[in-house]
Image (spheres, rainbow, N blue to C red):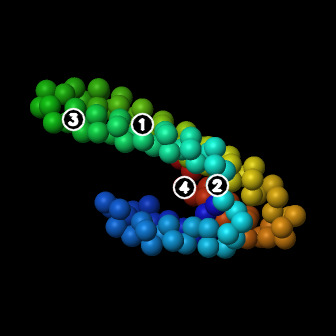
Amino acid sequence: MISAPVDTSVADGEGVEEALAHIGAHDDCLHLDAAVREDASRRLKSVRGHVEGVLRMLDDPNVYCVDVLKQVSAVQGALRKVSDGVLRSHIRDHVVTAAQRGDTEHIVDELMEALKYKA
């Protein structure tokens, strides 16, 4: 659930903790499904390893540009899968039940905000 916009221009983690402190501030009962959290965590750990591999490639002065582009594309694809899973979970678990909770307008606003970050 996204309750506050996260500044995507934050570099090197500066300000991330402050932004994350606002996530979930509206409703403590709305949480990311445990299975989705585990899947996202697993995928992101894999992405971390992949990014480290790309960094090692860049240490090689003979690295071919297209090879780097292919690996960056693979990282972007993996991040898209994480984003898709989290967004799907949010829609399934929170958006479709908003009317029952009586917070439809808030959830619609949140969804519109979340879609700004959808690649």
Q: CA distance from mark 1 to mark 2?
A: 20 Å
Q: CA distance from mark 3 to mark 4?
A: 29 Å
Q: Residue at position x 75%, y 53% from top?
A: 93
- In this view, the residue farthest toward the left is 61
In primary-sequence order, the first of circles 3 and 1 is 1
Label 4: which residue? 117
Which labelled disc corresponds to residue 32? 2
Helix, strand or loop status at disc 1: helix
Q: CA distance from mark 4 to mark 1?
A: 21 Å
Amino acid on which the number 2 mark rests in the picture: Leu
In primary-sequence order, the first of circles 3 and 4 is 3
Label 3: which residue? 56
**Which class describes the residues within 10 Å of circle 4: few (<14), some (14-19), or many (20+)?**
few
Which labelled disc corresponds to residue 46? 1
Residue 118 lies, with reference to residue 5, above or below; the image says above
Provide residue 63's location: percent of width, then percent of height: 19, 28
In primary-sequence order, the first of circles 1 and 2 is 2
